[in-house]
Amino acid sequence: MAEDEMDLDQLLAKARQTRPDLPDDLAVRIVTDAETVRLDRLKPASSSRRSVWVRMLDGIGGWQSMGGLVAASAVGVWIGWSAPDFLPDPAAIIYPQENSFVVADLGLDATFLEDAE
């Protein structure tokens, strides 16, 4: 076991001493790529201004979140307009009324036409 460890130590020491040479074409490609990246970073930012609506839409998450926002708003209006019986009426809470008034009798009574003769 000690002999194997010594062989391994010798192999690692030899590997540290001999460094492989970098091929010339690889060095040229690395330097060319680095120069391309450097020049791309030096370019001025595009000056195209986006509209306020596009920036707001991007701020809330795009069209997908806008669809969810519209659906939630529609459900809120629907529940507010025709609330179920177990929910309190918000208008009655804000403006309480003591009396209830009957606006009109909507029955179909045609007896007033018979008196015209």
Image: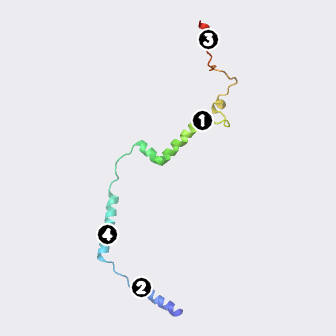
Report the mark closest to the observer, 3 or 4: 3
Residue matched to label 4: 31
Report x, y in % for residue 96: 67, 28
Residue at coordinates 52% horizontally, 45% vertically from top-left? 68
In which quadrant will I find the C terminus?
A: top right
Report the mark closest to the observer, 2 or 3: 3
Query: Which of 63 and 106 lies nearest the eye of the viewer?
Result: 106
Estimate how packed mark 4 is, as few (under 14), some (14 to 19) or many (20 or more) residues with alpha carbons within 10 Å.
Answer: few
Q: Are marks 3 and 4 in contact (CB under 8 Å)?
A: no
Residue at coordinates 66% horizontally, 30% vertically from top-left? 92
Residue 42 higher or lower than 9, as above or below: above
Residue 21 higher or lower than 82, as above or below: below
Report x, y in % for residue 40: 33, 59
Report x, y in % for residue 29: 31, 70
Q: Secondary structure at mark 1?
A: helix
Disc 2 to disc 1, how far (Cα)? 78 Å
Disc 4 to disc 2, how far (Cα)? 27 Å
Q: Is residue 53 left or right of residue 34?
A: right
Residue matched to label 1: 80
User: Residue 112's mark?
Assistant: 3
Q: Is residue 68 left or right of residue 48?
A: right
